[in-house]
Image (cartoon, rainbow, N blue to C red):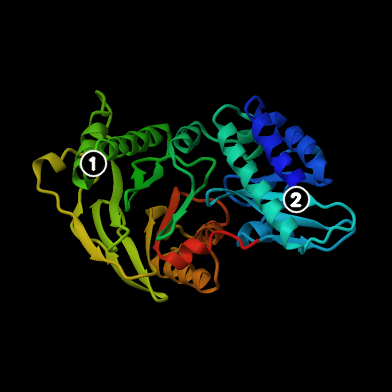
Amino acid sequence: MEPWHALFRQIINGAHLTTAGDLAKLVDDATARVGVVVQLYLTDVGQQRLQPVRAEAGPPLLVDSTTAGRAFQRTEIIAVHATPGYLWVPVLNGTERLGVLQATLPTGADPDDHWIREQCWVLAGLLGHLVMSKLHYSDFLHVVRRATPFSVASELLWQLLPPQTFACDELVVTAVMEPYHSVGGDGYDYSVDNGRARVAIFDAMGHDMHAGLTTAVALAATRNARRNGLGLLEGAELADEAVRQQATAGLKAPFATAVLAELDLATGVLHYFVAGHPPALLLRGGRMVKALSGTIHPPLGLGHLAKSKPQLGREQLQADDRILFHSDGVTEARDPRGEQFGVDRLVDLTELHEAAGLSPPETLRRVARAVLDHQRGQLQDDATLLLVEWSRAAARNVLPAP
């Protein structure tokens, strides 16, 4: 036990003065205490490849066709019986999937040994937290995670967004955006505090830097309202005014569609506000129950909310219900024959993957891949999905069992 404790202590103490580029050496020096050799792979932002942190580790590994990718997809510790044996261990920050760790064990060590698996899982969790902390101070890990260069608008938006997955005992929130490297006007946000979850999805007019700025303003306004203790309607009104103020002489006023929602985690009561956006979909028991349309208001930025009496929609959820938010770039994606991806296909795929036992983040990853495949990998519009699952079972499904 002591060598592993000393290993963790050495990494934690050394990390205070370690750059992102030096993390690999810090881990190497520490794991030498127990004879374990570690290679860290981080997923690209599109979650298609596992990129090695060290270039000498070899080429990226594909998420959809490798053992390492299966460990990432399933959030599962996978033992490989070779000489020497090794483990593929998912690397998480909280429940956000960052990549995988390959831990090669000393000769003769059993990869199925529960103690060894547990220590490697703790090591992977420690590295997940360190990776996220170093992302704030360095470009190195950002570069590792990019299989494709980002546009300036994407650079802006991804800096504003929360992690793609969060879970607590009663809830899982997960999101994907495509094309992740050139997204312009889509965005999402969430916060979970004091027994309430607040979520939002945005889609600004256009597909350029101006659209990205409009979404950034709308997101910042609703986040500001939330942090100042204001409700959904006040947040929508603040965003409406903030976006409207972006208009300059000679330019058409910008606007953004949005859905804002708040879920009481104890009671399952959902309140929501729709501003010109495709309504969220309520999924229950393998099918869509309804679209949460309520009262649909004009998009944010047109100045109408201050002149009207906006209303919130209300829905009582049942245990294990899922709320699927999406932008029109998902359902309106067209294949070469002109056929839209559509709401029915979106719901069917979401429910199919959930029924197969996949976690909410893996479900959305696969649905996003299906949307990309539908348009032969070239989306004509930003496509964003955000899934909220009010379920204790789903929350447990995002972590592996050592």
- The amino acid marked with disc number 2 is Gln
Q: What is the x, y in percent for residue 134?
A: 59, 32
- The amino acid marked with disc number 1 is Gly
Mark 2 or mark 1: whose residue is earlier in sequence:
2
Q: What is the x, y in percent for residue 44?
A: 62, 45
Residue 159 seen by the camera = yes
Quarter occupied by residue 344: bottom left
Taking 203 as reference, is 345 above or below it? below
The residue pinned by badge 1 equals 235
Of tags 2 and 1, which is closer to the observer? Answer: 2
Image quarter of the C terminus:
bottom right
Give whichever of 313, 110 is nearer the camera: 110
Q: Residue at x 22, y 36 (%)?
A: 238
Give the SS element for disc 1.
helix
Q: Residue at x 21, y 34 (%)?
A: 241
Taking 110 as reference, is 156 above or below it? above
Residue 301 seen by the camera = no
Quarter occupied by residue 219: top left
Taking 83 as reference, is 159 above or below it? above
Tell me if 140 is positioned left or right of 163 in this view. right
Q: Residue at x 48, y 44 (%)?
A: 163
Tell me if 79 is positioned left or right of 164 in this view. right
The residue pinned by badge 2 equals 102
Give whichever of 204, 13 is nearer the camera: 13
